Image: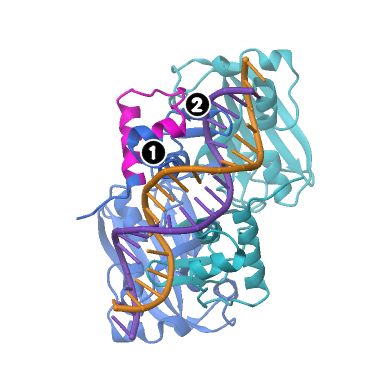
Chain colours: A cyan, B blue, C orange, D purple
Amino acid sequence: MNTVSKSMYVKQQIVKLIEQGVYNAGEQLPSEIQMAKRFHVSRETFRDAIKMLEAEGRLLVKHGVGTFVIDPLPPIASNLERLSGSGEMIRLAGLTESESLISLANSPCPDEVAVKLGIRSGEEATVLQRIRNANGEPVMLSVNYLPVSVVGDLFDRVPFSGSLLHFVENHLSVKIVKADTEITVPLHIDRNCQQLLLHPQTTVLLLKQVHYDELNRPLFYSLDYMRNDIFSFHIRRSR
Amino acid sequence: MNTVSKSMYVKQQIVKLIEQGVYNAGEQLPSEIQMAKRFHVSRETFRDAIKMLEAEGRLLVKHGVGTFVIDPLPPIASNLERLSGSGEMIRLAGLTESESLISLANSPCPDEVAVKLGIRSGEEATVLQRIRNANGEPVMLSVNYLPVSVVGDLFDRVPFSGSLLHFVENHLSVKIVKADTEITVPLHIDRNCQQLLLHPQTTVLLLKQVHYDELNRPLFYSLDYMRNDIFSFHIRRSR
DNA sequence: CAGTGGTCTAGACCACCGC
DNA sequence: CGGTGGTCTAGACCACTGC
């Protein structure tokens, strides 16, 4: 059984009440003390539920005033804040990945990459390059730099397939939980970029990403060229 | 006096201990009960401090195991997650805004904009267009759509100057706290984009943003064309 | 001032992990 | 099993807001 915490249960009940129109956007909720009694929980437990809903942007809490229902914002289409692998992003875009052309070799790390991975410049890395197709057209090109100090001879021992994230996680027993991403527009001179520019309405976005494990150790570096006529990129910003 | 909460104080103390090398990356902290006693606070208060540091990515908490110090990730250069006005972004890039060419007029809202603002297509809006210069060159071009149903005749009554966010906040007594942002690469045919493409190494990124107030009501829509050789855009993603 | 949310407490019990 | 973090409680007091 997957028991849910009390605060989680209360949270869901509040959402239901809002959706049923018991409390409407703009209206004030009864005080925390009253609500806690009504749900037969302690005030702190009720407050935990409130905090979650506030973080999700469904309630507005004003100190000394009250707690108010607000309209939920539309869900974000393809949210950049959530880390996902290339394959997942393709599926999220509603496409079926049909082929993945691969080149795989070891070579010294370029300076820019070495700096971001915190390793010596020129240190050996396994470079994995892939082109992803959908509907018979290239939609994405990615280059991954995996330092040998991290992956060892993994790619010699085990044939690579599927998701790089899962491959690395399963065979190195690490979890990749964070990434620092720089969003850029590549130059037209960029060879990698050019391979995606088949149509006049196509533009390409380049994500430069450092992937970290649970202990914030940089694991590998990625360049992801993605067609902007295929993929979309959204963020919810706040002050 | 700006008194800080106990949990905040404890949090800062823990950071100090880490920075002083009392606890190093990878090491386990003493149990919550011990630490709470040591700081003369209740366990819950200590846990509040822990939660903050976990959210900041400085501690890793494992249920049933312990709490561990991890290396802090480098601070994010110009973080897209934090909402800031155009002027602020220019200052963040280390530039001094020198001039702002403006056009200001009312016109019916284009369909795409109306949809995102949740208003009738063709509804009247004040359209504000600006080019920002730095070092004698254009670095950014922005177009803002402010529905008349929101701003009324504000722009007739009060001369516009400075930050649009502040202008709107001060004169309409609302707070702009969130924005949904789509990150795109404009086509080269785009007239607005072309005005920024003066150098061959210049590329341009286009942010399409809906700005919301505290109650999640859409206030206005923005198109921000920004030179990628001047501005950089970063996000920290997580699973 | 009265009423709201924000912080803190001491103690209890539960859920998870490694040995 | 013992030790860790996760949840919950009842009650106290503080900080903020609006009237």
In the image, taking residue A102 as reference, residue A224 lies left or right, namely left
Front-lying residue, B224 or A8: A8
Could you tell me which residue is drawn at 75 percent across and 52 percent down? Answer: A94
Percent of width and height locating residue B192: 46, 63
As displayed, is residue A117 above or below residue B179? above
Q: Secondary structure at mark 2?
A: loop
- Other residues around mark 2 within 10 Å, as few (<14) / some (14–19) / many (≥20): some
* Amino acid type, callout 2: Arg
Whether residue A82 is visible to the viewer of this picture, yes or no, is: yes
- Other residues around mark 1 within 10 Å, as few (<14) / some (14–19) / many (≥20): few
Which subunit holds the residue at mark 2?
Answer: A
Q: Residue B75 shows which numbered tag?
A: 1
Which segment is the magenta one?
A: B7-35
Front-lying residue, B37 or A9: B37
Percent of width and height locating residue B27: 45, 22
Real-space Cα distance between discs 1 and 2?
Answer: 14 Å
Task: Name the residue carrying label 2.
Answer: A217
Percent of width and height locating residue A34: 52, 70
Which subunit holds the residue at mark 1?
Answer: B
**The N terminus of chain B, quarter of image:** bottom left
In the image, taking residue A205 as reference, residue B38 lies left or right, namely left
Q: Quadrant of residue A53?
A: bottom right
Marks 1 and 2 share the same chain: no
Circles 1 and 2, Cβ within 8 Å, touching? The answer is no
Q: Residue A118 shows which numbered tag?
A: none
On whether residue A218 falls in the magenta region, the answer is no
